[in-house]
């Protein structure tokens, strides 16, 4: 059985079966979820991969994932078509730190604070002419 490694579409090296998981060795991380499905030959193309992800047929770390370009790192578990794939990093590869989602705690507002603030002024729009003076045509708006 061939192994699938992704390092800018590097050639596959090794896939091993553990008790529950099929081990996928990556030469470089991160890898996007839709590209991993394509490289592992689980789907016919990128469009099909994105469709299956959007419909909720793919799981990452034991949760359904609908983010098509989700970055996967070593240690992540991919679930597809009843099979579990464990991502690992090859020995000669350097690990990349996962980005940490920073969430700043927002101070709780008391009912008094919200009632005391004046309402925000709405942005006033200038009225645009319906017909251009020179051409006699209406202007086109793409916004």
Image (cartoon, grey):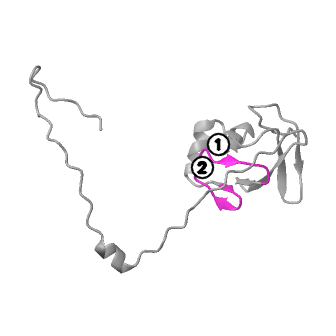
Q: Residue at x 67, y 41 (%)?
A: 43
Secondary element at image label 1: helix
Position of the C terminus, as image quadrant, is top left
- Distance between mark 2 and mark 1 Cα atoms: 8 Å
Q: Is residue 124 left or right of residue 104?
A: left
Which residue is labeled 1 in the image?
Answer: 34
Q: Is residue 67 left or right of residue 36?
A: left
Question: Residue 110 appears at what percent x and percent y?
Answer: 40, 78
Q: Residue at x 83, y 48 (%)?
A: 88
Question: Residue 14 appears at what percent x and percent y?
Answer: 88, 41
Q: Is residue 97 above or below residue 128?
A: below
Please tell me in which quadrant of the rendered image residue 113 appears: bottom left
Which residue is more in the foreground, 95 or 86? Answer: 95
Q: Which mark is residue 100?
A: none
Q: Which residues are magenta?
A: 59-75
Position of the N terminus, as image quadrant, is top right
Q: Residue at x 67, y 39 (%)?
A: 35
Magenta: predominant secondary structure element? loop
Q: For label 2, count other residues whose C-alpha is less than 10 Å away and answer few (under 14), some (14-19) or many (20+).
A: many
Which residue is labeled 2 in the image?
Answer: 53
């Amino acid at each position: 059985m061939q192994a699938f490694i992704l390092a800018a579409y590097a050639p596959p090296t090794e896939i091993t079966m553990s008790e529950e998981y099929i081990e996928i060795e990556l030469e470089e991380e991160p890898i996007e979820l839709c590209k991993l499905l394509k490289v592992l030959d689980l789907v016919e193309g990128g469009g099909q991969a994105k469709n299956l992800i959007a419909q909720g047929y793919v799981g990452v770390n034991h949760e359904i994932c609908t983010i098509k370009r989700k970055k996967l790192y070593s240690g992540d578990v991919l679930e597809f078509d009843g099979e579990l794939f464990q991502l690992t990093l090859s020995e000669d590869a350097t690990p990349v730190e996962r980005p940490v989602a920073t969430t700043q705690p927002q101070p709780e507002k008391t009912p008094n604070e919200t009632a005391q603030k004046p309402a925000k002024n709405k942005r006033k729009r200038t009225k645009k002419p319906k017909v251009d003076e020179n051409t006699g045509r209406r202007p086109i708006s793409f916004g």
